[in-house]
Image: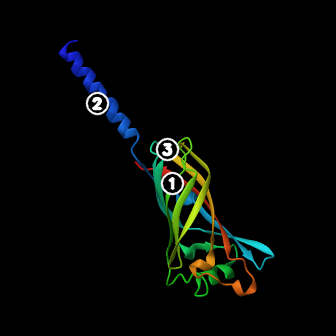
């Protein structure tokens, strides 16, 4: 084997290793606020379930499918709460509940876990709400990535589900009237791969 052939093979080997390393690197995604929909379901005196959503959110996901790891951060604006009832929205922003003047921000930060075929199935993280931070685990029911038809970049979406005890965050309004403190959390999220 000639020296030039050996050098070419060595260069080819390095190129393959470098490409493999690049493919396995973590990839960043920015949440699409127009297609991210944090919502919740809460008991109303044991006779019905009230549903609401937060209209404003931002965030970021870092994903390494080959390594089976990643992180997620969703920043929420409690003042954007929307029950579909203006009087209730105003009350929820006030001192008796979210007290958004004192606690204008909320967030969820976690690690993507339990990957199956390159897709995460669970998020182990913490919810910060009303000045309190507690662990909240989410299960991911759906996860899929496609090429965005207009932006021509990878676009990923997921549906995540969990629950938490709102009284653990100091949000115990209605407890004396028999309201169940358990809140179902639902997060529909879509994110575009960073350039």
* Foreground of the two, 117 or 33: 117
Q: Is residue 103 left or right of residue 139?
A: left
Would you name the residue on which mark 3 appears? Answer: 154
Relative to 42, residue 3 above or below: above
Q: Can you tell which of label 3 and label 2 is closer to the viewer?
A: 2
SS under mark 3: strand
Secondary structure at numbered mark 2: helix
Q: Which tag, 3 or 1, sits closer to the chain's start?
A: 1
Looking at the rendered structure, which numbered label has been put on residue 46? none
Q: Which circle marks residue 112 in the picture?
A: 1
**Quadrant of the rendered image containing residue 90:** bottom right
Q: What quarter of the picture does the N terminus occupy?
A: top left
Q: Earlier in the sequence, mark 3 or mark 2?
A: 2
Residue beneath the point at 54% across and 57% down: 123
Q: Position of residue 61 (x, y in %)?
A: 47, 55
| Rendered position, 3 above or below 165 | above
The location of residue 57, given as percent across then percent down, is 53, 65
Q: Position of residue 150 (x, y in %)?
A: 52, 44
Q: How has the structure been colored for display?
A: rainbow
Which quadrant holds residue 54? Answer: bottom right
Q: Secondary structure at mark 1?
A: strand
Disc 3 to disc 1: CB gap under 8 Å: no
In this rendering, the answer to whether 99 lies above or below 64 is below
Q: Are marks 3 and 2 in contact (CB under 8 Å)?
A: no
The residue depicted at 54 percent of the width and 50 percent of the height is 114
């Amino acid at each position: 084997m000639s020296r030039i052939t050996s050098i070419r093979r060595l260069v080819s080997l390095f190129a393959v290793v470098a490409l493999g390393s690049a493919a396995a690197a973590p990839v960043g995604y920015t949440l699409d606020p127009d297609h991210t929909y944090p919502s919740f379901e809460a008991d109303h005196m044991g006779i019905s379930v009230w549903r609401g959503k937060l209209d404003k959110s931002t965030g970021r996901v870092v994903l390494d499918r080959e390594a089976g790891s990643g992180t997620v951060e969703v920043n929420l604006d409690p003042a954007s709460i929307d029950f579909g009832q203006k009087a209730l929205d105003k009350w929820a922003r006030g001192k008796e509940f979210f007290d958004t003047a004192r606690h204008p921000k909320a967030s969820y930060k976690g690690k993507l876990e339990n990957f199956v075929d390159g897709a995460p199935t669970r998020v182990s993280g913490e919810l910060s709400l009303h000045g309190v931070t507690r662990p909240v685990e989410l299960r991911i029911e759906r996860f899929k990535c496609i090429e965005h038809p207009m932006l021509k970049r990878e676009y990923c979406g997921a549906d995540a589900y969990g629950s938490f005890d709102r009284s653990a965050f100091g949000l115990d309004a209605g407890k004396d009237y028999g309201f169940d403190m358990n809140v179902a959390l639902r997060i529909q999220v879509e994110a575009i791969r960073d350039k």
